[in-house]
Amino acid sequence: MGATVVAVHRSSTHSFSKPTVAEIELLEGLGVRGDAHCGTTVKHRSRVRADPDQPNLRQVHLLHAELFDHLATVGHQISPGDFGENITTRGIALLDLPVGTRLTVGEAVITITGLRNPCQQINDFQPGLLKHVVRTDDDGTVVRLTGVMGIVSRSGLVRADDRITVVLPPEPRHRLTRV
């Protein structure tokens, strides 16, 4: 079957969760048309407070549905869009991709920039959830499980059931870090 889009989401407000829609339009260099995070400069409120002129490396949020399966085993029922992602995927190990990976998703191309950094809002959404999506490994490495962020490298429409193809960047490859 391969990697596919489960669902797509957008919200014109800075709400935690995003409603599912039939399709989203990705705009090159900007993000998701009609989404609160669309733009060339950062739109996440905490990042805007720190530096409103920094480039928007978080134009599109992708999250793997396999995380929902895992969270169900520890008592958390999560649905597509609940974490505020724009694209819910299945069949692709998003967290293992290196920086600069290009994903063709529907008509669009997304270049992966880094990991989403989970925050306290996750516990506000469901108490106790944060400890299941961010943890520290035995070697002290912080592991973030709430998906990846990217920029739009080619405009296009994305819908549920669209295939996802992966093109890895040239060597040397760099592990994802939070953006």
Image (tube, helix red, strand yellow):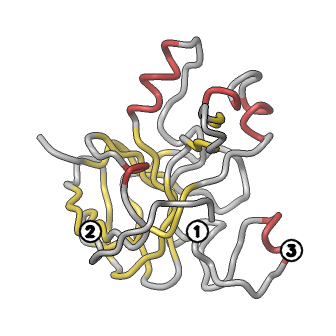
Give the CA separation, mark 2 to mark 3. Answer: 32 Å
Give the CA separation, mark 1 to mark 3. Answer: 15 Å
Q: Nearer the viewer, residue 93 or 60?
A: 93
Q: At numbered mark 1, what does the secondary structure look like: helix, strand or loop?
A: loop
Is disc 2 in contact with disc 3, using a CB cutoff of under 8 Å?
Answer: no
N-terminal of the pair, mark 2 or mark 3, is 3
**Location of residue 97 in the rendering, given as x and y in whole percent from the top left corner:** 36, 57
In the image, what residue type sits under mark 2? Leu
N-terminal of the pair, mark 1 or mark 3, is 3
Q: Is residue 134 above or below residue 68?
A: below
Q: Nearer the viewer, residue 137 or 150?
A: 137
Crowd class of label 2 (few under 14; some 14 to 19; many from 20; radius 10 Å) = some
Horizontal side of residue 6 vs 54, given as left or right: left
Q: Is residue 47 above or below residue 69?
A: below
Q: At numbered mark 2, what does the secondary structure look like: helix, strand or loop?
A: loop
In the image, what residue type sits under mark 3? Ala
Task: Identify the residue at horizontal 11%, vertical 40% (top origin).
Answer: 1
Crowd class of label 1 (few under 14; some 14 to 19; many from 20; radius 10 Å) = many
**Location of residue 112 in the rendering, given as x and y in whole percent from the top left corner:** 43, 67
**Location of residue 164 in the rendering, given as x and y in whole percent from the top left corner:** 23, 57
Task: Identify the residue at horizontal 53%, vertical 50% (top origin).
Answer: 85
The quadrant holding residue 90 is top left
Residue identified by numbered label 2: 168
In the image, what residue type sits under mark 1? Arg
Please tell me the numbered disc located at residue 50. Answer: 3
The quadrant holding residue 136 is top right
N-terminal of the pair, mark 1 or mark 2, is 1
Task: Identify the residue at horizontal 66%, vertical 52% (top origin).
Answer: 117
Give the CA separation, mark 1 to mark 2. Answer: 19 Å
Residue identified by numbered label 1: 58
